[in-house]
Image (cartoon, rainbow, N blue to C red):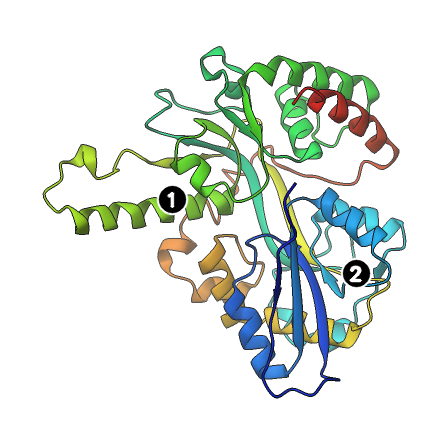
Amino acid sequence: MRSVVVWMVFVVGLMANAKELRIYNWSEYLPKSILKDFTKETGIIVEYETYDSNDEMYRKVISDLLHPYDIIVPSTYFVHKMINEGLLHKIDKTKLTHYGNLDTKLLSHSSDPQNDYSIPYLWGSTGISYNVALVNKTITSWSDLWKKEYQGSVLLNDDMREVFGIALKVLGYSANSTNPKEIQIAYKKLLELKPNIKMFYSGSQTQIYLNEHVKLGMSFNGESFMTQEKNIENQFSQMIMNPDATPDTKEEQREIRYIYPKEGVLMWMDSFVIPQKAKNVENAHIFIDYILRPEVAKLITRNIGYASPNLKTIKLLDKSIQSNLTVYPTQKELVNSEFLIDVGEALSIYETYWKMLKKDD
């Protein structure tokens, strides 16, 4: 089980009653330099913890009532779920001076139509990544993961809704199906995939793909972009260390490609929300507004590879990132895509089949 990573920012000389802020975010989803700069500017001491899945976050938030978080970062379908359960505090948008920087196309999502409870942080997709050196065929479909030649070679995200989502899309159903029969058929389809599954994983996937632990599998687009960047760094280092190397020894074949499957990718948007029990609501607003600054959002996208919803930020990014379809896809790449939404009472059906699917792992 992943141990909780706690990273705290301290400012020397601050008084004992200094302002505080508790943040619970996805792992490797915010550069530490951002936290340092925020504390230096505001004097707010940040306690920062991370998680690897929405389910992990949700369980911690509802169980740890004595030490509530002030900011968490759920995906769209969990935002809706937590609003319905009365777990979130309303956000005062009048305190967010940079709110107008956000892309209106990403606001008013069905999970929170008026953005009363959530402020977009980053958005992206879950598609397929594959190692070109290990996969000698063109990958175009989620159904490619089921091919017998990839036995013991596929990575799946350790995320119930996303895993069922790809099976549902292969079958021609909505990734948000609430039909018990369709969910059952998707479960049976996933049973057929089990011989190919090497691992369920939701941490950083960069080294898993580069070190050839798997050939192909599900991937967050930002992880894929950073894997591509890491590969370029490795090639450059290899060339410096061994300038006379032949192309075969320069790791030039360790290319990781990101694919938008023809059935459609699974779209997601992670947003800042303030839990109902938060003790530092004012500081939470200050932090959210800080992240909405174009120059701050630029550093985040550049360092972790996910698309910012901040329109002013996009203009500040290198042209190579603005035009990179892995980070900023066009409508062509997003054909048939779906945002995952809350499935209500059908969630228990998914959970039952998910436990059955993973019971032998």
Q: Is residue 64 above or below residue 243?
A: below
Position of residue 213 relative to residue 270, above or below, is above
Q: Determine whether 346 is above or below 194 in the image.
A: below
Indicate which disc residue 117 carries. Answer: 2
**Point 52% across, 52% down: residue:** 306
Q: Quadrant of the N terminus?
A: top right
> In the rendered image, which quarter contains the C terminus?
top right
Secondary structure of residue under mark 1: helix
Q: Tell me, yes or no, if residue 273 can be seen here.
A: yes
Measuring from the top left, give residue 209's x and y in whole percent: 43, 35
Q: Amino acid at mark 1?
A: Gln
Sequence-first disc among 2 and 1: 2
Question: For numbered disc 2, what is the local secondary structure?
Answer: loop
Residue sitting nearer the eye, 312 or 326: 326
Give above or below for 238 relative to 139. Answer: below
Q: Which residue is mark 1?
A: 228
User: Callout 1: few (<14), some (14-19), or many (20+) C-alpha neighbours within 10 Å?
Assistant: some
The residue type indicated by label 2 comes to: Tyr
* Disc 2 to disc 1, C-alpha distance: 35 Å
Residue at image x 43%, y 48%?
226
**Quadrant of the rendered structure where residue 107 is?**
bottom right
* Left or right of 30 in this view: 163: right
The answer to whether one can see residue 116 in this image is: no
Mark 2 surroundings: few (<14), some (14-19) or many (≥20) residues within 10 A: many
Which of 306/320 is in front? Answer: 306
Q: Is residue 117 left or right of residue 291?
A: right
**Horizontal and vertical percent for residue 135?**
38, 23
Q: Position of residue 29 (x, y in %)?
A: 57, 55
Residue 28 percent coordinates (x, y): 55, 54
